[in-house]
Amino acid sequence: MTDDADRIREEFFAESQEIVEALSRDLLLLDHGQKEGRTDPDLVNSVFRGVHTLKGVAGMFGYSELSESSHALEDLLDQVRLGRIALTQTALDVLFEGVEVLQRLLGAARGESHDVDLEGYARRIRNLLNSAVERDSDSLASLDLDPGVLSVLTEYEEHRLRTSVEQNIPLYQLRAKFALATIDTELESLKQQVKSFAEIITYLPSTEPTDDDALELVILCASRRTLAQFRETLSSSAIVVDLVARRAGSVVPSIVPSRPGELFDLPSARGSMFPGAQLAKDADVTPRAIAKTVRVDIEKLDHLMNVVGELGIVKSSVSRIIETLSERPELKPLLAELHRAQRAFERNLASLQEGILDVRMVPLSQTFDRLGRAVRQASRERDKEVRLAVTGADTEVDKLIVEELVDPLLHIIRNAVDHGLETTEARQRIGKPITGTIALNAYQKGNHVVIEIEDDGAGIDPNKVAARALERAILTEDEIADMTVEEIRQLIFLPGFSTAREVTDLSGRGVGMDVVRTNIGRLGGVVDVQSEVGVGTKFTLTLPITLAIVNALVLTVRGQVFAIPLSVVQEALFFDERGVRQVEGREVITLRGESLPIARVAQLFRLDSGHATSMSKPSPNAITPQQARRESTKTRAGSTRGFVVVASLGQRRLGLVVDALEGQRDIITKPLGKSLASVKGISGATDLGDQRVILVLDAPSILNEILAQDGGHHARLPS
Amino acid sequence: MKLNRVLVVDDSSAMRAFVRAALESREISGDVIEASSGFEALRLLPRERFDMALVDINMPDIHGLDVIRLIRANEAHKHTPILVISSEASARDREKGLALGADDWLQKPFAPEDLERAVLKVLASPRNLGNPGTGSPGT
């Protein structure tokens, strides 16, 4: 029962989150339309409906703050959709604030703390509600509508009908029979067809007995097209279109209905419509109403992924058995069959793995919607005109990555509005377009997803960055003198570079650029910055597509086998003990003319001192440097011992000294048990498939630990 | 169990999950059929039998009031008790729902006990006493 209650509550959270996200998306569209001087009533109604549903479910589940705030917002939206409150930027401010409020209250419902000023919010809504104007009109009387039909319309539908009449927009009725099995999709395609030139005001299902599997609908719409044009547009001849007449002396008397008598009052006159029927239609077809979707807890997918991992191990075991058996000639015919079966198994296992990964993928669009909201808010606060140009919102990324991306992206994008883009006056002065542009581009590149945030603002001035670094005593003047312009720009990612004041000011979340870099690094990704003074700044985030399966480099140190995600490995080269220098107490080698700090993995995990218990035997097929065929400029015969694996994360680089490399593997990292969870430098364990369990190096934490220490020589990870 | 089968029509999956749990935990109904839209409800009408319909009002495209109207117009279901469950507070909608043939109206939010009480009240009304829904054994 408790499980059940939890499951139902999860359903509530998932649905509420969907509603808030849809709300955000629709408001951005409304905001966009408003700036161009148009308001889509369907969209307003869709926003209203979402908030209405949220109010209802939040109430049922006992979240009174969430329910009450939704209720206040619902009241406001009701007035907007009825045309009593204009959808101005001021009104949109309050609506956008509403999304934030609901989002935070939803977080609060999940047990997070919130500091929402509910009273202030309620006051802003009340102020707007007080500005509502009563609109009373009897323009509907000019329509030759059956009074019975009029009485079935909701207040909202009456309002839409009245608006059309007042604007002299002709009314049409569409009549069509739909198969019940496909009515959702047929109706959706009809909506899409007429959307650009007609507004659907209501649907009236007929109760006239038809066969069980069909339903006749009368659809009332408003459109400026002529009847002939309307008929021509519709692809299906099964839809009968007629003009709804207006009484003599009314605004559009000239258009004569094509079939006199079949006016809008026809259904009830024919007795096919239930008198007194009412239908509040809504434009919003929720995705789940059309698509057959199901929500799945990501933990269940993780479990499936682990099963796939186990099957991978089974596969290797079977392969080994086949190998052993292949030495027995009498089994040859059977072996051929076994091989075939094994290949089929491998193929299907690969496709199963791919399928599960695919299920975890979600488009970036939801995240980008939130960014759109942040841009709007920041631009209103800073009084800057900003255009957000988005491409690649349908790029898909692992669900877990998407969740972790929100804060870093929010920070970068708010930064772009606050500091990247110049003020309107400054832009005018230097002859740039008044409206600043922030381009948000996402695309897939191999096994990575790249997200670029590019503004056409002032750029990052290296002199200012250097001055700030001096001021904060992050670097000395001498150090700065040695740096290139690009290196100086990278300083913005250092801890302590952003001030506390800016931190709260910028993101409201206490995130600085250093945290952005760390968070992205935790996802196995990197963030880079390019900038040109006076032209703009571009941040580039490169992320793995999934966290579930990682391509890793398998290596050995003192007989111990480790894996390191390839996403952080820049290259691997032979290690030459003679090339090691001491610089400020840290061991470094020279790589292509640059100093590279190194860390000996054996020392990090104290593998030399005999404390380590070997979890696995050294693999016989490990390559030692002597066996390696690859040439390296660093190799000098007889002087090498091991390899240097160059790990890089953003601008940080560290050479990890290891004994041997075994090659690449796709691994599924599993968390360590509780007793080992606090071991630094290890992110988890993985099965190699040949009954070896090995540890996965946590490259970001090793880099952070080692490079933060002053003397790297005897660096050891605290365990 | 008071009822064998209940149809729940609501476009909110969280709401359906809540109502289902309430029906099960209060032992109101043995079996629960869910419809996530007016269309889905209409699709179920010719095929399914049930003892009571719980219908939400504010749904996209085909409104709950239309679902009520179409249930009543269906020969097999015209006597099936209907309880409206909605967060609409407007008296106008309430009257419409009842005029269209709904037996009663339960305002959201409600607790499982409220739902049980409302179902019992509908079943005890004179028009339903000798007239169980279509889902009962033997009908």
Image: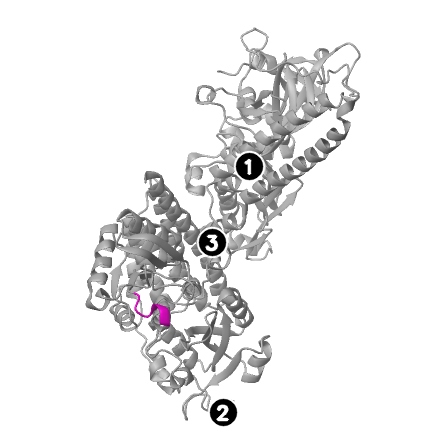
Q: Nearer the viewer, residue A80 or A305?
A: A305
Which residue type carries mark 3?
Arg
What residue is shown with label 3? A376
Of marks 2 and 3, the one in the foreground: 2
Which residue type carries mark 2?
Ser
Q: Is residue A191 above or below residue A459?
A: below
Question: Is residue A136 one of those drawn in magenta?
Answer: no
Residue A238 in sight in this render? yes
Are labels 1 and 3 on one chain? yes
Identify the residue at horizontal 37%, vertical 48% (top origin): A12
SS category of the residue bearing label 3: helix
SS category of the residue bearing label 1: helix
User: Which is more N-terminal, label 3 or label 1?
Assistant: 3
Residue at mark 3: chain: A
Residue A154 lies in quadrant = bottom left
Q: Is residue A605 above or below residue A48?
A: above
What residue is shown with label 2? A254
